[in-house]
Amino acid sequence: MRRLCPSLTELQAFEAAARHNSFTVAARELHVTQGAVSKQVRSLEAYLGVELFQRVRQRLMLTTAGERYLERIGPSLNELEAATVELMARQGRGGVLHIASMPTLGAKWLIPRLPQFFARHPEVKLEFVPHAQGYDFSEPDLDAAIRFGDGVWPGSLADYMTGREVLPVCRPGLLASEPGGVAPTPAALLRYPLLHHTTVPEAWPDWFATLGVPTREAWSGARFDQFSLLTQAALSGLGIALIPRCLIEEELATGALVVAHPAQVLAKKGYYLCYPEQKQHLPALRTFRAWVMEGADLARPT
């Protein structure tokens, strides 16, 4: 379908004339004649059916409609120019990747690794889109997103990254009555408050069921809507939290959190790099995806 859009030549002539309030100055900038600029503007006005300029005391002035039109098309022309310059400079390599990320994963796993990425790929620039506005790949300013879930999202491809390895953790001393400070059996954890993530309410029940301890008690306990809050709750001694290992490596290394039970369990959900099929060949996305997959967990979804 043909887009309802004037020619680029007409838009450039209008934008230049509007900035300078002069066909003559615009002509010098565009390296054409004054008559050519005037003709392009008249053609644009005829196409739009709207008067864009008026002459006031021999001066060229924008009409109200012209002012509004300039406000809308000016940024778009700048974007076109920037995209063209970038492509010419990079010759199709690298570029800008617009990406959204879950906040906790971004802060605890991705950002600390980015210096390595930029050292290897200085030709790629990352621009983070607010995650609340992300995941809608119909938006032109979103190329990829890091999402938490089961890896199935309509309209996008998804590569597993990390997050399925979960650990029950708590503040040191919470399990002081247990031998060695570690629960002897998974069922022993039910004697303590369990902390949950709001969007993964089945995490604890699935953990117990995997270890052969199905119980209704696994559903009870305080709930938090972000893993960062869940981690802080565990650090504060509110109970035992089930958290992806990738989000608490620092806390485990420093001893701020300890593992309440050593059972190794893979959760059903994790973090995935998602992107629309039509963008999978973008140079910046291909480079970023290859790097991410190098550091992805060996434990793949089954």
Image: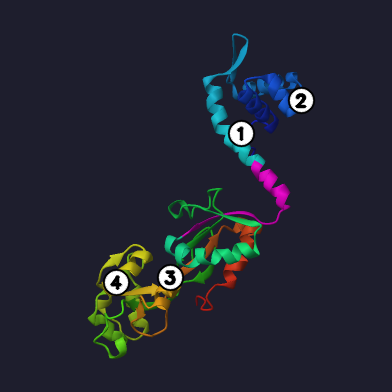
Magenta span contains residue 302: no
Under circle 4, the secondary element is strand
Task: Measure how far apart labels 1 and 4 are at the Cα level.
Answer: 55 Å
Q: Kindly identify the amino acid type of the residue bearing the numbered disc 4.
A: Leu
- Closest to the observer, 42 or 179: 179
Under circle 2, the secondary element is loop
Residue on which the image places disc 1: 4
Q: Kindly identify the amino acid type of the residue bearing the numbered disc 2.
A: Val
Q: Are marks 3 and 1 in contact (CB under 8 Å)?
A: no
Assign the N terminus to one quadrant of the image.
top right
Residue on which the image places disc 2: 32
Q: Quick one: label 2, few (<14), some, or many (20+) residues within 10 Å? A: few
- Closest to the observer, 105 or 143: 105
Which of marks 4 and 1 precedes in the sequence? 1
Q: Magenta segment, which residues?
A: 82-101
**Residue at the spot 30% in from the left edge and 86% down from the top edge:** 181
Q: Kindly identify the amino acid type of the residue bearing the numbered disc 1.
A: Leu
Estimate the x, y position of residue 180 in percent, counting from the top left.
Answer: 31, 90
Q: Quick one: label 4, few (<14), some, or many (20+) residues within 10 Å? A: many
Residue depth check, mark 1 versus mark 2: number of the one nearer the observer: 2
Decide if residue 184 is in sight here. Answer: no
Labelled disc at residue 91: none
Labelled disc at residue 247: 3
Task: Measure how far apart labels 1 and 2 are at the Cα level.
Answer: 26 Å
